[in-house]
Image (cartoon, grey):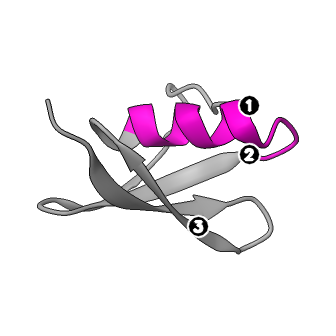
Amino acid sequence: MSDREYELKLQGGKVATWPGGNGEDAARRYVDCFRDAVVVAWRTPRFGVHIYNPNDRIIE
């Protein structure tokens, strides 16, 4: 799968743009570079915003 840019919503309300194969991959890559970051949601090119529910894991 080719990389796309995803908007990642970070804990604290900031937004970052990061490439990835999907939203979770982009979040993982971002957290790999910025270890203290917590991604709480991402905006995909096709499906809007994915917000974690209580059954999802927060990627830290």
Q: Which residue is mark 2?
A: 38
Q: Position of residue 42 (x, y in %)?
A: 43, 56
Residue positioned 61% across, 43% down in the render: 30
SS assignment at label 1: loop
For residue 58, side relative to residue 35 (left or right): left
Res. 60 mark: 1
For residue 46, side relative to residue 11 (left or right): left
Asked if residue 44 is positioned above or below residue 59 in the image, the reply reads: below
Specify the segment rendered in magenta.
24-37
Query: What's the distance in space between the residues labelled 2 and 3, CA to CA?
Result: 11 Å
For residue 11, side relative to residue 59 (left or right): right
Query: What's the distance in space between the residues labelled 1 and 3, CA to CA?
Result: 15 Å
Residue positioned 70% across, 74% down in the render: 14
Graded by Cα atoms within 10 Å as few (under 14), some (14 to 19) or many (20 or more), the crowding at tag 3 reads: some
Residue positioned 26% across, 43% down in the render: 3
Residue positioned 68% across, 60% down in the render: 10
Graded by Cα atoms within 10 Å as few (under 14), some (14 to 19) or many (20 or more), the crowding at tag 1 reads: some
> Closest to the observer: 33 or 60?
33
Residue type beneath disc 1: Glu
The answer to which quarter of the image holds residue 1 is top left
Residue type beneath disc 3: Ala
> Closest to the observer: 38 or 1?
1
The answer to which quarter of the image holds residue 26 is top left
The answer to which quarter of the image holds residue 23 is top left
